Image (tube, helix red, strand yellow):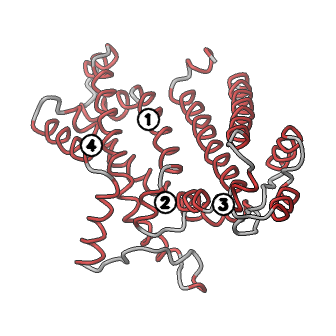
Amino acid sequence: MTLFLARRLAVLGLTLLLASMAVFAVLELLPGNAAQLMLGATASPEAIAALESRLGLDQPALTRYAHWAAGLLQGRTGISHFYDTPSSELIAERLAVSLPLAVIAMAITTMVALGVGVYAASRHRRLGDVGVMAVSQLGLSIPNFWLAILLILLFAVKLQWVSAGGFPGWREEDGGGLGAGLAALLLPAIALAAVQAAILARVTRSAVLEAMREDYVRTARAKGLSRRAVLWRHVLRNAMIPVLTVMGLQFANLLTGTIVVENVFVLPGIGRLVFQAIANRDLPLVRDVVMLLAAAVVIVNFVVDLLYALVDPRLRVRG
């Protein structure tokens, strides 16, 4: 296990290094002068020169990359040109909304998809299976922004159970609190989870059906184990590799792809921060946020690799 973990950590470090180079290089390759791009076409040469000096744009690219990468390793990011604040503070503030939102959406996705997927597989080609496949197809067909609007109309406008949007914050002294914050994230989480649950339910159903055809399942049934025990103790465990793969991709997608839903519910999350940074031509903030999202995807995949090894010990030997 130690060798397996060391190899995965080495791959993690190398991937983060390459990702940082790619993120830095993409912004360097933008046509024109970066300072003029941020200030606009009417900026004076003095203002452009001052911004270049302030952001270090007058230094060689390799020097700026080394400074930026070293800062990231020490927990320091660049300064947002638009907000005049360290990017790390803005990102931390927005992650306090986006991360709980992604976790809640992933929890809903997992609970619904695993239960429904196993249920459909256990009733293969019967009414329950057909019904689950039809509902999952419907879930795949509904855009999450349209579902978000429907949820607002039903639960906020018609029933008035929750607010139509906004986020009150996690601190009670600011008018929010844990309960109010979770209530504000519930509808966005459902809107995000609907499509992901439909996808994961289909993957779970297929993986369970394939595992149910294995010899060890027939052996377990021959020993007298109930159908439920065989499904949950033996089949699901061996069907988890493809399920974990999709779950890892989905969590990364939930964390990085919430721009539309956050805008519909007016949530101050990381998705809205990216949108605003691009609209404001705040390139230092765009670079730091993109690097954070790339690192989140890489780290989630690293965690999924570790879960593979826990589910199937043979993978530790193969490396």
Q: Sequence-wise, which precedes: disc 2 or disc 4?
A: 2
In x, y percent, where is residue 50? 86, 62
Q: Sequence-wise, which precedes: disc 3 or disc 2?
A: 3
Task: Check disc 1: other Cα within 10 Å, few if <14, some if 14-19, many if 20+.
Answer: some
The dot on residue 91 is 3
Q: Are marks 2 and 4 in contact (CB under 8 Å)?
A: no
Q: Residue at x 36, y 49 (%)?
A: 111
> The disc labelled 3 sits on which kind of residue?
Ile
Number of numbered discs overlaid on the protein picture: 4
The dot on residue 116 is 4
Q: Sequence-wise, which precedes: disc 2 or disc 1?
A: 2
Front position among marks 3 and 1: 3
Task: Check disc 4: other Cα within 10 Å, few if <14, some if 14-19, many if 20+.
Answer: many
Q: Residue at x 51, y 24 (%)?
A: 312
The alpha-carbon separation of the residues under discs 2 and 4 comes to 22 Å
- Label 4: element kind: helix
- Label 3: element kind: helix
- Label 2: element kind: helix
The alpha-carbon separation of the residues under discs 1 and 4 comes to 16 Å
Q: Sequence-wise, which precedes: disc 3 or disc 1?
A: 3
> The disc labelled 1 sits on which kind of residue?
Val
The dot on residue 101 is 2
The alpha-carbon separation of the residues under discs 3 and 1 comes to 26 Å
Q: Label 1, on which residue? A: 246
- Label 1: element kind: helix
